[in-house]
Structures are given as C-alpha cells and as structure tokens.
Amino acid sequence: MNAPAYNNRIFAEGVHGVLRVDWRLRCVTPLAIRNGLTIGYDETKINKGRGLGVKFRWREPEESGYEVAILHFGYEIADGSLQTYHYVPASSLRGALRSWTINHLVRPEFRKDMMPPEHDDDPEEKKQKAYLNRMRTALNDPHSGYRPVASLFGLAFETREEARDLAHAGRLRVDTKRFAAAQPRAIAINGKLNDGAAGPANAQRQMTVRNPLDRMTHASKEGGLHHFLEFCAGESFAAQLTILNPRPADLGLLSFWVREMNEGLLRLGALASIGRGRVQITEQSYHLWQRADLTPLQRFESVPDTSTGEVLAGLWCAYRLEAARLPEFESSLREHV
Amino acid sequence: MHNPNPFDFVPFAGHPHLKTPEEFDALGPAVSGYLEVKLRALTPVHIVGYQEPGAKEGYSFLYRQDDRPCLPAASLRGCLRAFLEALTSGWVSQATPEYPKLFHKRHIGFRTFEPLPSDGKRMSRTSPPAVNSEFKPSIRPDNRIDVASYLLGMVIEPEGGQVAHEALARKAKVWIEDAFIDQQHLVKQKYWVPDIKHATQDAFMGGAKASASNWWYLQPAEIWRRNVRTRAGFSILAEFVGEKFWGRKFYFHQDPQRCMQFYHPNSNNWRYSPDRPFYPIQLECLEKEASTETFRIYLDKIPQPLAILLAVCLFPGLNIRHKLGYGKAYGYGSVELSLQSSHLRYDETRPPDLLQDFSAKLRDWMSLAWDQSKLAASEMPVALLDWQALGHLARILGRQEADKLLFTYPPFAKRNFMQPVTFEEMQDNAPAGIRVNGHVKVNAQQGRAFAENLFEIKQPIHFRVYQEKAKGWSQITSRKP
C-alpha cells in the first residue's frame, strides 16, 4: 500500500499545545556572528611593533584607514537615547538547527538542490519544475527524513499554485535574547583590553588576526593579513524555542540538538574551521501547555499554573519535563526517518 | 664547507591531484566526531602576538586570546594544510599573485599563476607563470577540487567583475580549535632570534627574498648581460634569471640554541656592520618539552579513507614532525601532536549514533604511516599521494640527527649573496659547448653546470647546487619517511 501523500494542512485541527524550550547557551569557544558591516580603526605605527596602538572608531571606515567586520548588533531607544546591544539573531540559531537537521536526518539524495532555483537562471522554469518534483518526492516518502524538517521549519514556495499542496508555516519559532554582559566589555587585542570607542557594551569581544603564508616563500601573502572581531568565550545568551502542537519526535530532535551542540558538532556562526561557534547549553527547561481534554506527552509532569506566570496559565494545563528525561524521546524520532 | 640553508623545497608534480566532492564522498563511510590532542614543543615555539621595540633588543610576546597564551587554530590549520597540499599534490591555496617590477628593488617582474608581459627600454619580455596555473585554486567546469580543499574548505577570491558567490566557497570538514598554554610553561629572556637594526630603513635579517634575478627561489631559465652602476662606475654583470618556483617551501629542524650561537656577534661567524648592528628579538616561548593544554580537532563527515589520511598527516610516523610559528629558520617551532582521546562515530545512520572511543582504531591508522601497501590495504587512496613529495618532506621535516646538523643562511658577504658575478667571469666559466655573447637560455643541466663552475666565485647562485655541497647533505638525503 502506498504511504499517504504529505499533508500540508498541519494546523487543520488548530493549535492545541505549545511547548516552550528555554536554553542558556554559553560560548565555549569564540563566536563570530557578523552583519555585513565594517568599522574603521586606527593603528599607531610603531617600528616593528605589531598589534599595539589600535583605536576603534565605531563608525564607517575611512578610505585610507583600516577596517574590520563587526559583530551583529541591534538598537533601541532607551532613556531618551539610541542604545545598541550585541545579540545572536534568532535566524542564526534557527539556521544552524535546520542545517544540522537536514544533514543528519534527511536521506543523502534529498540533501542537495532542495533550495528554489533563481528565476534568472531558469527562464523556462525547467529547474523550478525539477525542484518541485524533488520536494514532492521527498515529502511523500515518509522515510526520507524530510517531513520532520518541513513540519517544524515550514515550507515556502514562489507561487500559489506551487504552494497549494505543499506550503505551510512551520511549528517552530526561535527567539534569542541579548548577551548577558558577563565579562569586561571592551575589545581585547592580544590579551589587552582596548580603550577605543567600543560600540555595544554588553559583550566582551576580541580582535583576532589571520596572516596566511605564501606556500613558496613563507612570506606573508600579500593582502592576506586581516583582522576580525568575535565574541569571547564565556559570553552567554538565552534562547527560547516555541513548538506548536508538539509531538514526541520533536522532543527527540531537541535531544539531538542539545547533545550535538554540547559535543561541538552543531555550531553557531562563522569560522567553524578554526574552532569558532562551539556552545554549551548550561541551563535548559521544557514547559508544555496543552488543552485540558488532551493527554499530555509522556514523561511530562503536571505543574501548577501559578508557577509559570505565562499567558496560557489558567487557560490550558501546564506540564514540565525534567531535562534529564529528554533523551528518552530519541526513539520517537527514529520512527520518522 | 658551508652549512645547508635553513629551508628547502618540495617540487611540484606535473599536475594537481583532483576529484569531485562526490568522488571524495564515495570513498568510504563517513566519520564524524573529535580528537582530543596535545601539542608538545620539541624546540621552543613562538607565535607572535605583538612586538615591542627596545633600544638594543626587541621583544616578541606570545599570542594571547582572552589574556591566555595560545597557539591559534589558524596557525595549526595552516601548518596542516601546507603539509597536506604538498603531500597530495594539491592546489597552492596561498600565493602572492604578483611580484611587480620595481625600480631599484626588483628588476624582473613575474606572476605566480599567469604570464606577466613587460616593455623595457631595450626589450619586451613576458615572464611565464612561476607555477603551473593548474595549481591555482579555481572553480572548474568538472567541479573537481584537491584533497585539502575538500577537507579544510576553500574560499576562492572573485576575480575582475565576478561577484562573490556560494560556488566560490566550500565549508571545511576539519575544524581545529585553539591550543591554550599554561602560563607556567612559558619562558622569557631565554630564547631570541637575530635581527638587524637600521636608523631609517626596515632592515631584514635572513635569506634572499623571492626574485626572478637569481636561482634561489626560481629555477634556472636564462642568463642576461646587465649593465649596473656601481660606486666604481659601470659594471657588466651576469644576471641569473629564473622562471619556475623550485617548489613549496618547508624549514628544517635544528637546535635553536646551537643556531643562535652561530649568529651571535661573539662567535665571529656572522658579520654585522655598524649601520646595521646586531639586534636580537627576545621571544616569549612555549618551552621545549612542554605541552599545550588539550585541544580538539573535529571531523565532520569525512570518508574513512580520508580520515586515515588526516591521521597520518597529524601524526606523521616515526621521523617526520611539523614546524609551526615564528623563527622556523633558526630552529624554533618543531612540534609533535599526541592523541589524548577520540570521540568518533560512523555518520551513516539517521539520526546519528553516539560518539564512541575510537582510540584503538586511530592508533591502527597512525601506524600505517608511511607504508604504501598497508595504506592501500586500508583503502586510503594512495594514488592521491605524491610519493616523491613525501620523500622530499621526509628529508626536510625528518628529525633524524636534527640536533647535530646546523642550518644557516648564506651571509651577505663576498663569495656569497653580496658577490656579483661579472659577465666576463660567467663567460669564462661557461660549460663546454656553450658560447655566451649576450642573453642566453639555459636548461636545468646547463644552469647547474654554470653554478658548479662559478661556485668558487659565488656559492649561492643555484639553490640545489648550494644545498648539495653543504655539510651534512648526505645525512639529509638518507632520511626516509
């Protein structure tokens, strides 16, 4: 008997449960999350001195000066002034989770060419049709591993026709909080804190250098010397994942995410090749709110509403999972791949 | 008899060894996880964090991160990648693209991967590429890449109007973390490297820089007749024009304390002039025999045969050891990695299995270095290796008798780098059958013959001839992997 085709109407019965995951992530190694902008800095020339006399200007680089890529930041109006703060954008964490999931859950033949082709590259839409066929095949195969990915992260397509039987919003939402300001807040260079205009003050950063060597001469490759900023190891931030209508397989996937992040195999940001982006989940909590007429997920214990202070308190029943029991859901995920 | 030069070259093979990523993927089951390793200093190790000048000596402080001394991951990666590229006839991932002609500084311009035409007053000439352009990293129509790019990633700089695109970047499958050093293993005021000071110019201590006007970095191609203005008037000199790089450069191992004695003014081996006086740079080092703290090297879905290759590169057998950091020419930076633990898995199941202890398997893999038949039996693709390059790497990076050999730069002195060769001297010493009236092309044998005949006038004309006539050369050539 053929497996049923993928049903994209995942909210046909409405939302009947919300799982809230709270994590605190601590940077075990430095973290480089950039936003595409650069700032200028001055460097006092000292004969045969290297790395001394650097002064940052938290503004666009001047034509004749030095520049360095800066780290992601946001801004708000507080106390009548514009305040900036560093944070890891939710899209960065979400993207890392999605990428890991595709690379480890989805059958190899469905891992590539699963992004919509560029229109400019495909005037007769042959590539677009091939892409849709691949997506349909992956989604209609219950063992492709693609269904959990689609269900959590959602599926989007270019046109209504394509979207009709495949597209839907995802059940997962990711939010992040700004860095916790746990360490001295200036920019460190070669171990020394720099006193220049440091920009957002809620995370310690460091400026690191790469200096590739020419393979034939071992001289510094011309134009190769470059600096970059990164968040220091030890910085931490909170993240919240919300999953609508959670299933046991979702918790199984969460368990893998936690383990793989703690092992360092699921990293955030750029420069994993030089060890950046390893984080450890130092705190984790799992709360479930569910319609009263439904049986809660296994292993969740009922908790009084008043303990959570949440908007759903009093409306739905509240439950909590001991973090240590999260791995018990992993077998549920295996049934879906 | 002179000491051999502190570095030597691993010659390029005819072509790079390339495969498509899919061909690499298909080599075997994928392995993921991490190794925990320590790095031990066989000689003191220094990576520059920052330098401070002083009146009579300079100071170079070890690299720090978060105020903790460390050997940065980028340095460890670079060391591994350079070795891997040479071993597997890989692309030249880092190369200065052009050495332009500069008035009074560089007489002949050249490019690494492309020809460079120039119009001189008397002649036009196109310098050919110094390296076969096939060794330049590129996005190929057949999508083939070298092993180093497959394992360590690549970013290919867009050229001309080309916009940066994902096709120009490939994610690494080997991730290396920083190696931190306990403060108690640092030593100051004990080790130094020689340098020279000049009142107004950036003085430079060390061997010649890459130039097409000698056969030190580039192989013999031509001899030119060149009019040069000197203090005595005009001289007609022989210019030994080179075209192709000898190969990829690596430094020999040696005892830095013996080497420093050689360069110290008190030894009278090395002459320092009053306007370029001796100026040592004191180095803050990871002390000899000390180790870093444990650090991690990650594998991200690497086919097992290439995981074996990675293992033999990280732990390269009985004799070969790597060099890292500053002062390699003076013996600093000889290092050895040791495996502390391994946490790996075969990454074929969905979702993935737990990481397990692979130490026994790792040690089996390490023991394969460098037995070709055993490596083949393990299904490591031995055809990917340049076995001749391995022989050269063993000569240069072999530790046999490293404590007994001394490697020093040819001095800037008579009969050495300072020595010009007049055109007449060159003509008088031309090999039999070669008449030189003006510019002359030479092949490899002829270039060697010229250098041998002129050796009593100037020793460092031809790099290979200089090395082969050095003290201890037979011990070096007898080194095996």
Image: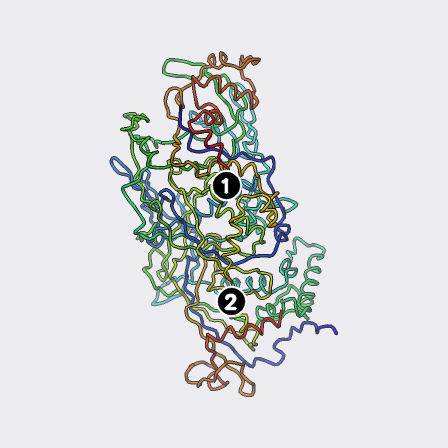
Residue B358: percent from the left, percent from the top? 51, 58
* Residue B134 shown left or right of residue B62 in the figure: right
Specify whether residue B443 is in view. yes
Residue at 24% across, 36% down: B55
- Position above or below: A121 against A243: above
Q: Amino acid type of disc 1?
A: Gln
Q: Residue furthest right?
A: A1
Amino acid carrying mark 2 in the image: Trp
Q: Residues within 10 Å of mark 1 (few under 14, many from 20)?
A: many
Q: Is residue B7 left or right of B147 when viewed as pictured?
A: left
User: As rendered, which of A26 and A168 lies closer to the eye?
Assistant: A26
In this view, B481 is above or below B234: below
Q: Residue furthest bottom?
A: A293
Comparing marks 1 and 2, which lies closer to the viewer? 2
Residue B320 in picture, x, y percent from top left: 47, 41
Residue at the spot of label 1: B94
Give residue B278's position: percent from left, percent from top.
29, 31
Question: Does B106 sit above or below residue A276?
Answer: above
- Whether residue B213 is visible here, answered yes or no, is no
For label 2, the residue is: A257
Name the subunit of mark 1.
B
Quadrant for the N terminus of chain A, please.
bottom right
| Res. B445 image quadrant | top right
Q: CA distance from mark 1 to mark 2?
A: 36 Å
